[in-house]
Image (tube, grey):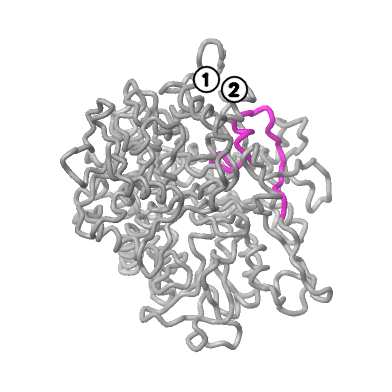
Amino acid sequence: MLEPTHKTTALAVLGGKAVMRGALFASVLTLLSAGTPAYTSADSGYDDPYYDPESSSSPHNVYNRPSDYDPGALLGSSNGGWAVWDFCYGKPDETQLPEDPRALVQEGISDGRAVHFNAYYKNCHVDPEAVREVGAAETCGELRERFDLGGRLLTGGSPGVGALFAGTDPFTPEAALGISTLTRRQYNNLWKSWGGYIAKPENYDALVAERYGSVLPAGRNPYPLNGEDPNRTSGGSGQLPLMFTQMRYPDGTWTGRIGITCHACHSGAIDGEVALGGGSPLADLDLFLRDALPQGYLASIATLANLSHTRGTNNASDVNLAFIFPDQGLYSASDAIDLITSGSTASMDTPAWWNLGHRPVKFVDGMFPADAPRIDQVFYTPLFGLFGELLGPLSDAGQKYMRDNGPPINAWIETLKAPQYPGQINTALAEEGAVLFHELDMWAPERDNTVRRPEGNGSCAGCHGAYAPRYVNDPDFLASPVLEGVASYIVPQEIIGTDPVRWETNNEGMQRAGSVNFFGYPPTRGTDQDCGPQNQERLRGDRELGYLAPPLYGIWASAPYMHNGSIPNVWEVLKPSEREPLWRRESAARLDNPWWNNGNVVMGYDTDLDSAYDHGKMGWKYDVIDCEWRSFLNPSVSPYRTCDPNDKHATPMAQKVLDGLYSNLILTWNIFFPPTLTTRQMEDRKIYNTLLFSHGNEGHEFNSVLTDHERRAIIEYLKTL
């Protein structure tokens, strides 16, 4: 049995320097200090463009990966992150960077190999002057500078921190003078919207984190209490959850204004501690906006355009809204109609940041190249930067912010490592699972699989990439070992079979509109490095639409699963027959409050690995929810639709009409959902109802041919990634 490890393997920023932590890098350094020779492509017969035995900077033998040092092993993982960043570990600033391994993912690279790619890397910065945005860093020092800037932009309370729709300075005209930020009074008085409280609770900070689905960070993230001057109290006496930050003036002094950060959706919690960049299944921003509106927070109107019907999901991928305002002339009439009638992508599960460095394309349908950072910066853009050319200088100022800050934010995100599984692992079973994951053909004749066969060798690795050193170093699997963990197969809908709402929303006209929008890098249009939406017919050719199979680093820590978060554990991904139509994760134990002030305490999900995590099924424990009638104002846990698990496919006429509206008219998804008013309605938002629009838990039916033992072995192997 493998011994338990610490719960995080990540990059820590200490004194402005990036320091690698974790068992992987400790073991690598031990091997290096012991004089263990690095494995090279010459040993495998590769014609590897990355390997130069005469060069000390050859990335293949200095990437600090298990596959370099024990090439025949079945277990070993780089834990995600980005190979270019790993290359710089321990090297001087002037060291020249190698090419990004993802750039190898071009048409033909996977022909005849076990791991298949059909979505290819694009360089959006071939002409930096044309796109007015810096290209890739050229040295380790330049990359470290970008990392430091990106870390400041995303670290709560730091000088230069950014916040949603405010940039780094909320009081600029392009940020609409801070309309997206809360005043200290508004933040300090959120409890007045909770009901049942006669005074601000003493454990207010902890209650805010629980109610809105965040976690209190270990480092200081201060805010001023009412009456405090933040510049005389080192930012204030309060401690903000990770999802919030107090903003600063350009000179570094505190503003007293509270902004929302990317961590609201992109960082969750494990064992009550921050899971940085893991994608948060905890957040309930709708509830936050509901509470903030009575306190005068006008940005609460955003709930109509975004967010979710279910706690832990969001609608942040509704980029059709960002495409409404063109940047190079007007859209064609047909494209404008397609854009308006594209509908809503609706409920989405936030993907883990620690996999971004292994994705040549990003978003669940592979819509943008990985080298298109400004789309990741969209929510940090000062508000008026989202209006295309409409607002002239205000738009220009907002877009300049995206150009300046998108690349460093991407550089920071791509370095993140997945946390190592903290429990014990059955080594023999995990090694068996490694072979099954990489070799088992689920379409072998004896399996009698009724689903259409995908490209690749029919294994899990065929879609999700190769990880075990034995297969990473096998040219039958990958064209080069530097492609370890890279996944870039958009699996056709007919094969993957998951809820189709997301890719259907991103229709052809909407994608064409995106190609002349600021986010689509219009200067690249028509070139061989066209960075507009990649699922346009002119770019994808005969490739079918569907969903991008993601890399699987840290999969144990990123439940629930599927692009919409509809399946609570990996076991049910692999065994579709055991999926439940309505389920709810367990809530954390109620925090103590004095009897005279015990108001509407809404707790988040339990993140304790001992009590709430199912290590056998790899996911969070849950309760099965029954359908029930309540009242005419709140008819059931499934408004407008049957929630009878025995009548899963029966749909009342009201829901059929609404589904058609949601699918065909932009901005309609939230309007017809009952408002969240009572504590019971807040608790009902924890129920995942797979019968609602965009919530379907179908798909991955090809896994039905696995045996239970094979499922257990594959899960045991996934714990090691």
Query: Quadrant location of residue 597?
Result: bottom right
Q: Is residue 453 left or right of residue 139?
A: right
- Residue 573, image x, y percentages: 60, 33
Q: At x 53% / y 44%, what residue is drawn?
A: 345
- The answer to whether marks 2 and 1 mark residues whose Cβ atoms lie closer than 8 Å is yes
Q: Amino acid at mark 1?
A: Met
Quarter of the picture holding the N terminus = top right
Query: Quadrant location of residue 91?
Result: bottom left
Q: At x 50% / y 50%, what residue is drawn?
A: 419
- Residue 217, image x, y percentages: 55, 66
Q: At x 34% / y 60%, what residue is drawn?
A: 147
- Residue 616, image x, y percentages: 65, 37
Instruction: Please tell me how crowded label 1 is: few (under 14), some (14-19), or many (20+) other residues with Cα within 10 Å.
Output: many
Label drawn at residue 592: none
Compared with 68, 309 (above or below) is below
Q: Which residues are magenta?
A: 561-587
Q: Is residue 504 left or right of residue 529?
A: right
Label drawn at residue 442: 1
Q: At x 57% / y 34%, what residue is drawn?
A: 715
Magenta residue check for 50: no
Q: Residue furthest left?
A: 54
The residue where tag 2 is placed is 706
**Mark 2 residue element:** loop
Instruction: Determine the CA span between mark 2 and mark 1.
Output: 7 Å
Lower sequence index among marks 2 and 1: 1
Compared with 617, 266 (above or below) is below
- Residue 45, image x, y percentages: 25, 25
Q: Nearer the viewer, residue 206 or 397?
A: 206
Compared with 87, 18 (above or below) is below
Q: Is residue 496 left or right of residue 697?
A: left
**Mark 1 residue element:** loop
